[in-house]
């Protein structure tokens, strides 16, 4: 007999009719027809003859990347073999085509690595706050000798990071392993170096302001470009998490660039060179690409695990999603999973991912947001309609089995589909911020030549800007307002209306995103990258 976990009250008595109808062996594998609309890929296969989605996904993400073009190889060399306190599985190195770094090496030193036991509890928080504050203005070794020592100690590793940022590719394999070393579902893949790369970005942001304090502006600018490239490389990773962290790093770079601009006061030629450096950066990766590949494969891999392993796999998925399900005896669930038409389950799921990808590829933000909002409404309705008890009941009726299978597909998608609308919004927000960053350097060049900012953005064309980019939120030109001491340049933000340049950090609060010069006169908020 099987152990009888409850798939979250329906009683055994209430399900007696269904239980009596169980004919097939509980763990016989229900059939599926491999193909583009169902399994999407037909191989490679694992030892049990099922699709090895981990290998299939990694092969596609890797593409033509080699160890010499892959930034991840060097990032691991800088971070070390235990990025989050545990060793990376050997399969990471197999996919990367490299070897594990030695246990002892010149790796990046984090707070406690360098400052030691002297900073605990409140002292550690004070250190974090001081670090955040130093990233907002130029500072010198005389101001903070301990922080300067920390940067020097990390110099060799940060040099490796800078080399990594110059590489064209970023491939971090999806590896999911259970404690005993056996393969787990893709949704359990660990992205062990991602958060550490975010910490590297904070360290580089600190060094930008340290270089500015020493008036080493060329070195400061190189760190800004390293930050931008690092964020954009990370965004190319397979997961939405890597995209979001890449966007966050790009925001750190943007704020560092604006503080650098104000501190360095470049002449027109240098300001335009910096502008051109920004324009040469590769774009942030597409949200649509993540949904179409890694998110889709995560769904397919999870569906296969439920189909193959039954209650145990379904229980794990429900636990990961913190779903609330009626309590159904395991035998009933096993019988339901066997009866489902798995071709229809997979086709239904792929239909959602097709629709989401199509929406994300629409050319304008307004079109994308409208399509994504409609999908969210339909997903919520499908979740309500995908009543688990009804699926159990209808799967036992041959005439209703197809519809029950469709609802099972809806249910799995609702468990696994991330909040893509918010990720898309984060990507749009950073794109408009980057546009204001580039224009800030064009405005600085104009100021260097004329000792004043232009009356309107159109005056920048053609000498300082080839064209003035639109605000992606309004489809109209970005709002520009010269002031007595500088200017305001901003987007209307997600609410689509002009809040007078007020951002989330202002009082009264607004929803506008942009640049306010002078930039460093704003009161900094620890970790603030929002405006």
Image (cartoon, helix red, strand yellow):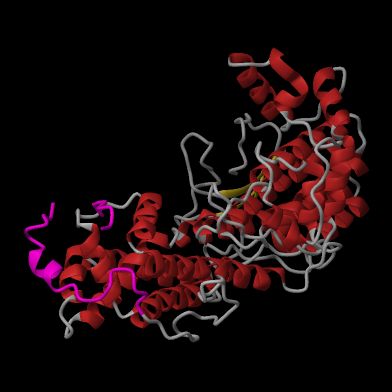
Q: Quadrant of residue 152?
A: top right
Q: Position of residue 164 (x, y in %)?
A: 83, 53
Q: Nearer the viewer, residue 157 or 26?
A: 26
Q: Main secondary structure of the magenta part?
A: loop
Q: Residue 243: image x %, image y %?
A: 61, 57
Which residue lies at the image location 41% right of the left edge and 51% below the top edge?
320
Q: Residue at x 28, y 72 (%)?
A: 25
Q: Is residue 362 above or below residue 218?
A: below
- Quick check: 207 above or below 249? above
Query: Which residue in the rendered view is the most extreme toward the front?
Result: 1
Specify whether residue 96 is in view.
Answer: yes
Placement of the C terminus among the 4 image quadrants: top right
Query: What percent of the width, then of the height, locates residue 183?
Result: 55, 59
Q: Position of residue 132 (x, y in %)?
A: 67, 29
Which range of residues does the magenta coloring cover?
1-30
In magenta stretch: residue 12 = yes
Q: Residue at x 76, y 30 (%)?
A: 137
Is 67 located above or below residue 508 in the figure?
below
As drawn, 318 above or below 299: above
Q: Is residue 455 visible?
A: no
> In this image, 455 relative to 411: left or right?
right
Q: Quadrant of the N terminus?
A: bottom left
């Amino acid at each position: 007999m099987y152990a009888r976990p409850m798939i979250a009250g329906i009683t055994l008595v209430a399900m007696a009719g269904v239980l009596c109808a169980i004919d097939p062996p509980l763990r016989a594998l229900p059939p599926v027809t491999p193909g583009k609309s169902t399994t999407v890929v037909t191989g490679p296969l694992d030892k049990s003859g099922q699709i090895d989605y981990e290998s299939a996904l990694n092969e596609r993400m890797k593409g033509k990347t080699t160890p010499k073009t892959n930034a991840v190889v060097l990032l691991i060399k800088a971070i070390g073999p235990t990025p989050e306190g545990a060793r990376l599985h050997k399969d990471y190195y197999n996919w990367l085509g490299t070897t594990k770094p030695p246990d002892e090496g010149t790796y990046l030193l984090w707070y406690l690595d360098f400052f030691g036991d002297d900073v605990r509890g409140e002292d550690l928080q004070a250190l974090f706050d001081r670090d955040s504050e130093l990233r907002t203005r130029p500072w010198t070794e005389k101001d903070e000798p301990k922080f300067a020592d920390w940067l020097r100690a990390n110099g060799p590793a940060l040099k490796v990071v800078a080399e990594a940022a110059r590489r064209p590719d970023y491939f971090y394999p999806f590896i999911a392993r259970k404690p005993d070393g056996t393969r787990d579902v893709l949704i359990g893949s660990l992205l062990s170096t991602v958060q550490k790369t975010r910490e590297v970005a904070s360290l580089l942001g600190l060094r930008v302001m340290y270089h500015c304090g020493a008036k080493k502006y060329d070195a400061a600018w190189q760190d800004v470009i390293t930050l931008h490239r690092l964020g954009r490389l990370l965004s190319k990773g397979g997961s939405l998490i890597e995209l979001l962290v890449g966007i966050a790093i790009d925001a750190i770079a943007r704020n560092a660039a604006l503080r650098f601009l104000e501190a360095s006061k470049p002449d027109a030629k240098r300001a335009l060179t910096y502008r051109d450096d920004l324009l040469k950066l590769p774009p942030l990766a597409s949200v649509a690409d993540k949904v179409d590949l890694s998110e889709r494969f995560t769904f397919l891999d999870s569906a296969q695990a439920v189909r193959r392993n039954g209650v145990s796999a379904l229980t794990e998925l429900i636990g990961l999603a913190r779903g609330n399900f009626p309590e159904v005896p395991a035998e009933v669930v096993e019988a339901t999973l066997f009866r489902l038409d798995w071709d229809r389950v997979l086709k239904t799921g792929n239909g959602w991912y097709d629709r989401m990808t199509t929406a994300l590829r629409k050319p304008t933000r307004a079109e994308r947001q409208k399509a994504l909002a409609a999908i969210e409404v339909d997903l919520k309705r499908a979740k309500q309609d995908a009543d688990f008890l009804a699926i159990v009941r209808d799967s036992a009726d041959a005439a209703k089995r197809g519809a029950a299978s469709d609802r099972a597909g809806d249910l799995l998608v609702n468990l696994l589909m991330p909040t893509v609308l918010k990720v898309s919004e984060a990507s749009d927000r950073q794109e408009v911020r980057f546009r204001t960053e580039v224009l800030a350097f064009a405005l600085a060049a104009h100021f260097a030549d004329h000792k004043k900012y232009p009356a309107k953005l159109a005056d920048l064309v053609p000498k300082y800007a080839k064209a003035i980019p639109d605000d992606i939120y309004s489809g109209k030109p970005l709002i520009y307002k010269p002031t007595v001491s500088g200017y305001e340049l901003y987007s209307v933000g997600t609410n689509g209306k002009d809040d007078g340049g007020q951002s989330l950090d202002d009082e009264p609060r607004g929803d506008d995103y942009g640049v306010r010069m002078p930039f460093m006169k704003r009161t900094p908020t620890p970790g603030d990258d929002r405006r």
